[in-house]
Amino acid sequence: MKQRIITAVAAAAIFLPIVIYGGIPFVLMVFLLASVGLYEALKMRNLKLWSVPGIISLILLWIFLIPNEYHDILDRLNYSKIELALFAVLLFLTYTVVTKNRFSFEDVAFSIMSTLYVGIGFYYFIETRGAANGLTFVFYSLFIIWATDSGAYFIGRAFGKRKLWPEISPNKTIEGFFGGVFCALIVAVLFAVFSEVDVPLILLLLATAVLSIFGQVGDLVESALKRHYNVKDSGRILPGHGGILDRFDSLLFVWPLLHFMHLL
């Protein structure tokens, strides 16, 4: 626990000031976090980042992460993100032939899905911060996920009896699941009281419940991926916490949903 606290404080001391400052330093930080996340995902399947498919995945990830405000970069090339993604698919498939299926069709699918999984979530992190009230919603997303995680853990330990999904995450309970949602709703009420965001309370509470649920789903998705590949943690970059994907798995679901539900 001591190691987790030290790591959390040190990481927050670096992460939060850059998030607050925003701009190019923030975008570069997100590019770095996403790149490490992609490395962790590919490593689970024993795919190296510094390989032909790894570099294709990395370049495609960086293309996905280009913020809307810098979209003129792609406009000058006269290509869309979708077109470049489709070109990457052709390159992946070509590489299966070159390697005589040592890099297989399944590896192609995993590389593409890993890039989308990491890229979409972190792209919407950038877009959330770049919105007019973006910093407020970044902290909103962080607080409700921290509340969800803490509530699920402590309420689950105190009252948890029924397993939520033992095949995926043996320690999670149904009581903890709903406890996490309840704690997130408390944070949403505080957010409505102390922030100046013009969102009706009932809408904010409904959105928070959805985000808390999908945040826990994001956690389960990462757990399922690690269990499938028999990996304890996605990485070791954060002592006591694991890797980047271990820390951002819930938020990779929450940030896109903030936009899909038109909260910003």
Image: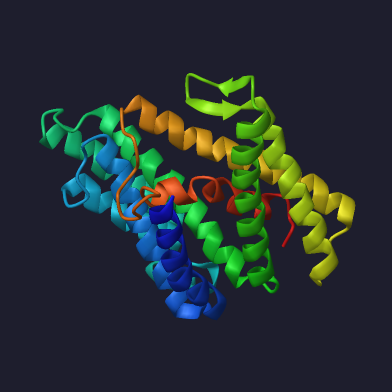
Above or below, 101 against 32 in this view is above
31 sits to left or right of 46: right
In this rendered view, identify the residue nearer to me: 121 or 179. Answer: 179
Q: Residue at x 27, y 28 (%)?
A: 105
> Can residue 60 be spotted in the picture?
no
257 sits to left or right of 98: right
Instruction: Indicate the position of residue 138 as horizontal and vertical percent values.
Output: 62, 64
In this rendered view, identify the residue nearer to me: 132 or 250. Answer: 250
Instruction: Indicate the position of residue 56 as horizontal and vertical percent values.
Output: 26, 51
Above or below, 242 against 142 in this view is above
**Location of residue 63 (image quadrant):** bottom left
209 sits to left or right of 224: right
Q: Residue at x 33, y 57 (%)?
A: 35
Q: Residue at x 22, y 45 (%)?
A: 53
Instruction: Indicate the position of residue 101 as horizontal and vertical percent values.
Output: 15, 28
Instruction: Indicate the position of residue 167 as horizontal and vertical percent values.
Output: 48, 19
Q: Quadrant of the C terminus?
A: bottom right
Above or below, 149 against 107 in this view is below
